[in-house]
Amino acid sequence: VNEFAAALRDLGVEEDDVVTMYMPMVPELPIAMLACARIGAPHSVVFAGFSADALATRMESADSEYLVTCDGYYRRGDALEHKQKADDGLDDVDHDVSSVVVVDRLGDEYDHPMDDGERAYADLIDEHAGAEVDPVERDAEDMLFLMYTSGTTGQPKGVKHTTGGYLSYVAWTSQTVLDIEADDTYWCSADIGWITGHSYIVYGPLALGTTSVMYEGTPDYPDKDRLWEIVEEYGVDIFYTAPTAIRAFMKWGSQHPDQHDLSSLRLLGTVGEPINPRAWKWYYKHIGNENCPIVDTWWQTETGGMMVTTLPGVGTMKPGSAGPALPGIDAKVVDTTGEEVEPGRAGYLTVDKPWPG
């Protein structure tokens, strides 16, 4: 992190400059994020699966002059090129882009030209080996990062998360909801390109000093028991995933988790969409051995951290129901006129007041 922070400084990145990152799940991504945080430069991570046009739109909106990307990545054993997509996106950015840093992920499998203004990540790290950079002091309200919503309901919206509120809130929710302790091995299976990855792969767990598992690839390659193999091998204590994944695990069959020792697991979590009671019960039985509390967490890109969920060991779990609002969250279910609805009635979930994050 120190070495890359020094490299970014040398490339001209200053406090408050937005650095865009367009990378898959490789260690260089969280390293780059933390390097930016260290020098007071907000980062803007663009999910690697997004198009060149999505990259251009986000760089344009953020007025970002710096990009960290990679030559390509692996998917189900196949090497996929990524650099061309990044180049296509850069061609559509109207302002000048000062520097592009390229991580070599594919080695000899993909030979890509380095254009003017492009630097190899490995060369920069070598040039700044052993460097130490004093962290830049930031105000609580200074931007830590920019994250764009997916744009499914119109133009992508840039959500700014600030240093003090965001960091304290993801650390607190990681500790109280996910029950993370420093000596745990914790695994959130999200992608860092989404807010879940920012909050609960990078910032929350690392703020608490825990060991965080990061996984590149799909859950069914090379085999459908890949995730459970990793849980067993590393003695994972806490596992946080999405209902979509859980439904896939159900479809593949319980024989895959059943052939592994998952007794290290202490807590399970779910995020991203509502989970139906059937999937909840399967997760509870076949992954948690009816021994692990499940936290079903509701929140959004805009909130930065969890808002509605049961607390493990405190709240009563109900399959398919997220639970009450966390302390400090003024959540209500209202009708179209803004009036609170009675229990058992459908309505809109609102958050009326600011919250600790």
Image (cartoon, rainbow, N blue to C red):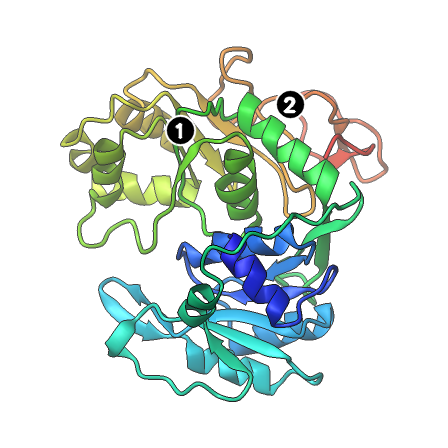
Residue 176 position, x and y percent, is 56, 21
Under mark 1, the amino acid is Trp
Query: What is the number of the mark on residue 280?
Result: 1
Q: Could you say where residue 314 lies in the image, as x and y percent from the top left? A: 55, 11
Tell me whether circle 2 and circle 1 mark residues in contact (CB < 8 Å): no
- The amino acid type, in three-letter code, at marker 2 is Gly
Residue nearest the viewer, comparing 60 with 125:
125
Q: Residues under labels 2 and 1: Cα distance?
A: 20 Å
Q: Please tell me whether residue 314 is drawn above or below residue 244 in the rendered image.
A: above
Residue 202's place in the image compared with 39, above or below, is above
x 32%, y 29%: residue: 282
Left or right position of 100 against 9: left
Q: Is residue 20 visible?
A: no
Circle 2 crowding by C-alpha within 10 Å: few under 14, some 14–19, many from 20: few
Q: Give coordinates of residue 242: x percent, y percent.
A: 44, 41
- Left or right of residue 78, residue 191 in this image: right
The residue beneath circle 2 is 344
